[in-house]
Image (cartoon, helix red, strand yellow):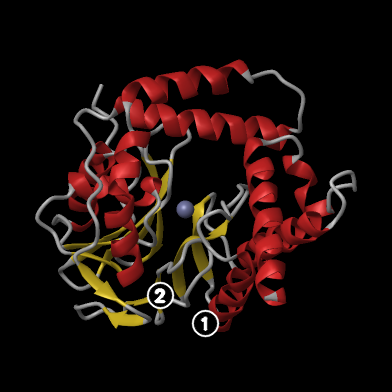
Amino acid sequence: MAPNPAPHHVLQPLADGVRAALARPDGFAICNSGLVDLGGAPLVFDTGMIPEVGRALRSVTEAEFGRGPALVANSHWHMDHSLGNQGLPGLPIWGTRRTREILLEQRTAMEADLERQGLERSVRELEARRGGSGSEGAARDLEFLIQIHRALLAAAEPIVPTPPDRTFESRVDLPGSRAAELRSFGAGHTEADAVLWLCDERILFAGDLVVVGAQGSLGSGDPIHWLAVLDEIERLAPEQIVPGHGPVTGPAGIAETRDYLVGILAAAEAAPTAALPAALRRWEGSLSLEENLTFARQWLGSRRGTART
Ligand SMILES: [Zn+2]
């Protein structure tokens, strides 16, 4: 039997020369990627969790466009979107200036997180939680967290975080005959997320600023400004949106992410015993919800503290 040409992704054509590479739940990509032929120079947007995924994206790009990638871009520094960079050596990597800085600052901490014994222990702890009480969403969230650890344990070589070497602040036009730009609207999911915007096709690769059927993590960014960033994204009037996680969506994906954030902020302000807002109930009992609520309570508390002084 011929090997699966895309072991970590399901490819979805969005337009001529534009593909969503959606993470397979049984693969090690973890995040969605984008493949865009900029006009003889293919771009890979987000590179997945491990170097192997970067190499797979090169093969898929060659198969789809008849030539390998010429450049790479990262939506943000999180490991599942950037560690695949290592598998695409020799290519220029675009990202926001702050994404580069954070990846450099976090290198040592990340390398500690990638330590094998720690990962094996974490997988055992997560697996021991299987079958516990909680919603269907909680079970799905748990499997996602387990798969993240499995991906890191499956890496064939030591992982070295590889930051972008071409940076921008708010906007850069990418080279090539297709209108393609990277935009950043400031802090949201992280301190400076980037999106890839194809204005002629009205296609947006949103990174984790938009997630569908999943929970974005709040802990690296600014959940209130994230809402303003979603307004900016909505003003672009995208018709197709590739979220960082989940299926291809449209404006409904922005609304889903907004409802989740508003729900978290409301729950963080409410008494811990209060019922969860409707937008959060599907995730009741999940580890990511607990983490996001803990972060939001601390974050809102520190903002109130700052406002007083
Ligand atoms: Zn992320």
Please state which of residues 154 and 27 is positioned toward the viewer in this rendering: 154
Across and down, in percent, residue 215 comes to 61, 49
Q: Could you say which quadrant of the image residue 95 lies in?
A: bottom left
Q: Which mark is residue 236?
A: 1
The amino acid on which the numbered mark 1 sits, given as a three-letter code, is Leu
Side of 124 relative to 176 (left or right): right
Whether the residues at callouts 1 and 2 have beta carbons within 8 Å, the answer is yes
Instruction: Residue 59: tell me if it is visible.
Output: no
Q: Position of residue 105 (x, y in %)?
A: 31, 55
Secondary element type, mark 2: strand
Q: Position of residue 140 (x, y in %)?
A: 62, 33
- Mark sitting earlier along the chain (1/2): 2
Q: Residue at x 47, y 77 (%)?
A: 185
> Does the closest atom of ligand 1 sit within 8 Å of the Cβ of label 2?
no
- Name the image quarter holding residue 184: bottom left
* Circle 1 SS class: loop
- Residue 49, percent from left and from top: 35, 41
Residue in the image at 35% along x and 31% along y: 152
